[in-house]
Image (cartoon, grey):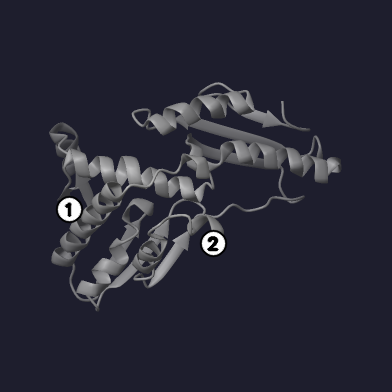
Amino acid sequence: MAANTGSRERDALITEHFPGLRYVDVSPEEFRSYYLSFRTVRSGRSATILDRARFTLADWEGYKRVNLKFAACLARESEPGDVVWVHDYHLCLVPGLLRSKLRDVWIAYFYHIPFPAPDVFRVLPWHMEVLAGMLGADQIGFHTIRKALRVEKLLLGVDRLDYTKGIVQRFEAIGNFFQTYPDLKGAVTFLQIAVPCRENVSEYRSSGGSTRADVGIAEDRRFEFSGGLV
């Protein structure tokens, strides 16, 4: 199930390859509110970049409205015993909304970036509503960052050039890693691949440039560390 934002050529191509796909009609204004605005706020919370957060009631209402549309469509399409898998932070409310409509489906939810610390999450004015929505799922999965020690030879990061991914913080962590374990210099290599994304969103355009500047890289380049930051 995916949002129909009015791109007929794209939707026709996707439907051709995925005939079972169902669309949820989302107006351009709703898309701006739930995906480009409130969704960016949510991801900003997750990356702990508090200065990027901008909260408006209009965006929150748009976010809720689209989540309601997805839940209603899922309720119509689902049958008893079905497994419903909801993805990512732009649909946090869907598990709870769907659970209020259906009691006999299994709901899974996956949050695709590291979840924020409690003190950061509470900055969001509607954090309890978001949490209640997620807890409507039977099972919740989270993206995690694992620490790599002596057993690793290559540390690989593959991400969009996206401030929610914490790329700058990752480079800083690698520097701290080599300071803590200097004997591993030359034995461990860090490789980061980053691809530009969502350049129609100002937050991503500005953060992409600052990220490249902060780590001294260029787009589509591979980065290698054997002793510290360069």
In the rendered view, tell whether residue 206 sits above or below residue 167.
above
Label 1: how many Cα within 10 Å (few below 14, some 14–19, many 20+): few
Indicate the position of residue 200 as horizontal and vertical percent values. Answer: 33, 28
Residue at 30% across / 68% down in the picture? 96
Indicate the position of residue 116 as horizontal and vertical percent values. Answer: 52, 55
Secondary structure of the residue carrying numbered label 2: helix
Q: Which residue is mark 2?
A: 118
In the rendered view, tell whether residue 75 sits above or below residue 51.
below
First-in-chain label (2 vs 1): 1
In the rendered image, is residue 91 in sight?
Answer: yes
The answer to which of 189 and 3 lies nearer the viewer is 3
Residue at 59% across / 34% down in the picture? 192
Secondary structure of the residue carrying numbered label 1: loop
The answer to which of 155 and 94 lies nearer the viewer is 94
Which is in the foreground here, disc 2 or disc 1?
2
Residue at 70% across / 40% down in the picture? 174
Q: Quadrant of residue 100?
A: bottom left
Q: How many marks?
A: 2
Q: Residue furthest right?
A: 183
- Give the Cα distance between marks 2 and 1: 39 Å
Residue type highlighted by circle 2: Pro
Residue type highlighted by circle 1: Gly
Residue at 81% across / 41% down in the picture? 179
In the drawing, what numbered circle is on residue 20? 1
The quarter of the picture where the C terminus appears is top right
Q: Could you tell whether 157 is left or right of 162 in the image?
A: right
Q: Could you tell whether 97 is left or right of 206 in the image?
A: left
